[in-house]
Image: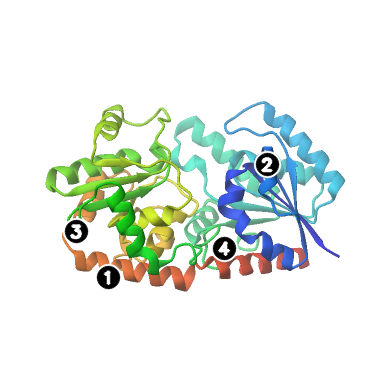
Amino acid sequence: MSKKICIVTTISLPIDQFIRFSFEEYYMHGFDVSVMCDMDEDFIKTLPPYVHAIPVSMKRGISFAGIKSAFKMYKVFKKEKFDLVQYSTPNASLYASLASFFARVPKRLYCQWGMIFVSFGGVKRFIFKTIEKLVCKLSTDIQPDSFGNLNFCRDLGFYDDKKSRVVYNGSANGVNLHKFDISKKQEYRLNIRSKYGFSDNDIVIGFLGRLMKDKGCDELIGAFKILESRNSNVKMLFVGPTEKTGNENKELLDYFYSNDNIVKIGNVSDAERYLAAMDIFLFPSYREGFGSVVIEAEAMGLPVVVSDIPGPTDGVIRDKTGFVVPVKDEVSLADKAQVLIDSKELRESMGKSGRQLVEDKFDSDILKTEIVKNREWILSR
């Protein structure tokens, strides 16, 4: 008999980013997989024929419409009688944990890919921390995608060691080493650097992610401003959406948008090509589940500088594949980047070690096998 599972996220993007890579592995092991999220027809058409689509309207942010979403989930869960419901992303996790609990789904798996409360203060922090604790309480199993967040939440008393674990070495989807092919780095590098007018002498500082405060973009831009004052040959390659989200430093944003030395790329499907063009990767985020872009950068042989938070630090060997700096500290970020600017030898040695780390611990082909083994183990308990 096939094992029926339903994977729930708020919107379809996390399905594409973190779950799609394992569909075939599930299918080969006899799982009957459904995905549930706020989806459109174009997304549904991209799903393999053996994956069932269950559209449920959900939006980001707090909304009373969430009650309707949770009730629809409840009806689907009661009807379909899934053996396991898996949920991740904030709204989907709240709605699906409640709906699957009341529908008496036997296994309720919370894939804890980051916690938004950690970057909040005051009443807002209390509310979102309480929601996080509720989701954990309603779940039979919790799987953070980093050991740092696993230990952080155990220390907070959100769950114990019997209920929680990290699969393999962490990260939601690892790195596809066929896509992030280090043997093509020089080809990609020459192509992208030529396209955007970078010279051989330019040191390209890179970032991959959304322009938002929680990603540490104030510190990223501030650090680049410092580096630009110290060096005549630094550039930045900013890969990701650059629309304002409302709470960034206005002065720094004006500098970011007006500076021709900061090349803004937008969303891309071939991040490996842009990473290959970089010399140093900075990721000063305030909160992450894991921070997949860090190991993707390392996969393309880049030294990294990350903030000292659970998640990104799980993907770095300190002072061997990169540097770790305090959160919200643009001067420390700039200083460590400067160390790398000043030493090509160090950049190359850290980059080589980073690639080896990813090959040893974060290969997505191994991770997807371990994920399916884990789901079989959960269902057999």
Q: Going from the N terminus, do you reach mark 4 or mark 1 first?
A: 4
How many other residues sit within 10 Å of disc 4, few (<14), some (14-19) or many (≥20)? many
Q: Which badge, 2 or 1, is on the more N-terminal residue?
A: 2
Instruction: Give how far across and how far down residue 358 sits, in percent.
Output: 44, 68
- Residue 166 numbered mark, or none: 4
Disc nearer the start of the sequence (4/3): 4
The percent position of residue 267, horizontal first and vertical second, equals: 45, 43
What's the CA distance linking mark 2 and mark 4?
Answer: 24 Å
Q: How far apart are marks 2 and 1 (CA)?
A: 43 Å
For marks 4 and 3, give the CA distance. 34 Å
Mark 3 to mark 2: distance in Å? 44 Å
Residue type (three-letter) at the residue carrying disc 1: Ser
Q: Which of the two marks, 1 or 3, is nearer to us in this view? A: 1
Q: Looking at the image, is 218 positioned above or below residue 192?
A: above
Read off the residue under disc 3.
339
Residue sitting at x 25%, y 47%: 197
Q: Name the residue under label 1.
A: 349
Which amino acid does the dot numbered 2 rest on? Cys
Q: Is mark 3 on a helix, strand or loop?
A: helix
What is the crowding at mark 2: few (fewer than 14 residues within 10 Å), some, or many (at least 20)? many
In front of the other: label 2 or label 4? 2
Q: Earlier in the sequence, mark 2 or mark 4?
A: 2
Residue placed under numbered mark 2 in the picture: 37
Snapshot quadrant of residue 27: bottom right
SS of the residue at dot 4? Answer: loop
Q: What amino acid is found at the position of numbered circle 4 in the picture?
A: Val
